[in-house]
Amino acid sequence: MTTSEAGAGFGREFRSFLLTESREYAQQLIERFQAEIPAYANIDAAAVSDSLRQAMERVVQVVLDRGRLEPLDLAGFREYGALRARQGIPLEAVLRGWQIGVRMSIDRAVAAGRDSGVGDALLMDFTTDVLTVTDDATLAFSAGHRDASAVLDRQDGLRRTELVRRLLFSDAATDDIRLEAQRYGLAIDREYQAVRIRPLGDDSVFALGEELQRQPSCRPPNGLLSVIDDDVLGICATVPAVDDRVVGGIGPVAPIGDHARSLRLATRAVATAQAFGLSGVHRFPELGLLPAVLADADVGEAMSELLIAPVGDGESAAAILDTVDRYLESGMHVGATAKLMSVHHNTIRYRIARFEELTGTSLRDPHIALQAWWALRRRASGA
């Protein structure tokens, strides 16, 4: 028996039953969705009832009238999936709801058909046709949901990036910034720290951004990040957990709309850390004078002319400068320096004396020691 004959076999009574009770049926479905599918629990029933009713009616009408979905029907189901995506219902939840709806529709159709005297063979053919059509409908609304989700993700990413820019670069928090921050789940009465993090080597900054955004410390209400200008920028309540594949800076805490200084210090921290080969996330105060060494090129050049250039070039000069560097790092203790460098004490003494002889200075003078440290840090930065 053909599908059109099946439709005739059901007759007007069945079609009338389905259409006249469709709204009540849709309401029953939604109540079951909300009881069994968490994603539907807080969705307004009115927002989904009409589209659900229309979708289920379309399946039955296609089975009774034609037996297959036409392009216009497929477009309708793609829009059904897109609508659910815009309503924030995940595809998995839509599929689960669809399974429940199809099963309940078949049960109701079979019961109505038997009450109307339709034979079991015809009901079985009808059920098979419904399942075939709903498979095609499932493919269509799944594609619509995925396409709409991709668009929404891009739009959300753009909005998030714009909000992060405004949070970090605005002079003050306007009412619309506060509202947008709240929309993303941030607490406007909470203080956050500006962060700037970048990958080292050839790692993707977008992959880093996705990795960080999965951390609770970087997600609302604890933070909000986005990829901006080849770095991951944003605000966080706590320091993100990172490994030695990245370098970052974090600024002082500040209220929403007052992160310009926090970002500036975070930016200086990351630039300083990267220049000196320090991985991980660093606070500006923890870097001591290193930001000044990096930023004040005039002082660095003067110190280098005074205390680096006279030592000369080559392996011997490098050994002397490395020894002075370790000597200052070890609190100017010859024994500790010798142990750190795995050389004899007398070698350390000779190299220190040679440095003082070539530069005409004494490291016992604290001002000279500080200037030497500054010049050596500039040398370490590659400046």
Image (cartoon, rainbow, N blue to C red):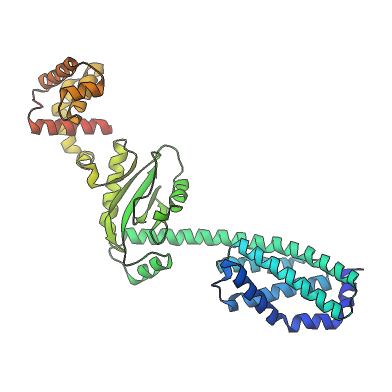
**Is 308 placed left or right of 86 in the picture?**
left
Q: Is residue 132 above or below residue 206?
A: below
Task: Identify the image quadrant of the N terminus.
Answer: bottom right
Q: Position of residue 278 (x, y in %)?
A: 31, 37
Image quadrant occupied by the C terminus:
top left
In the rendered view, would you say 248 is above or below 80?
Answer: above
Q: Residue at the location (24% across, 44% down)?
A: 286
| Labels in figure, total | 0
Q: Quadrant of residue 323?
A: top left
Quadrant of the rendered structure where residue 53 is? bottom right
Kindly tell me whether residue 193 is visible in this rendering. Answer: yes
Q: Is residue 72 visible?
A: no
Foreground residue, 268 or 11?
Answer: 11
Residue at the spot 75% in from the left edge and 81% down from the top edge: 19
Q: Position of residue 59 (x, y in %)?
A: 76, 71
Residue positioned 57% across, 67% down in the render: 38
- Residue most extreme to the front: 35
Q: Is residue 251 above or below residue 109?
A: above
Please identify the quarter of the rendering in which residue 340 is found: top left
User: Where's residue 78, x and y in %?
Assistant: 67, 65
Q: Position of residue 382 (x, y in %)?
A: 28, 32
Residue shown at the point (36%, 66%) measured from the top left: 187
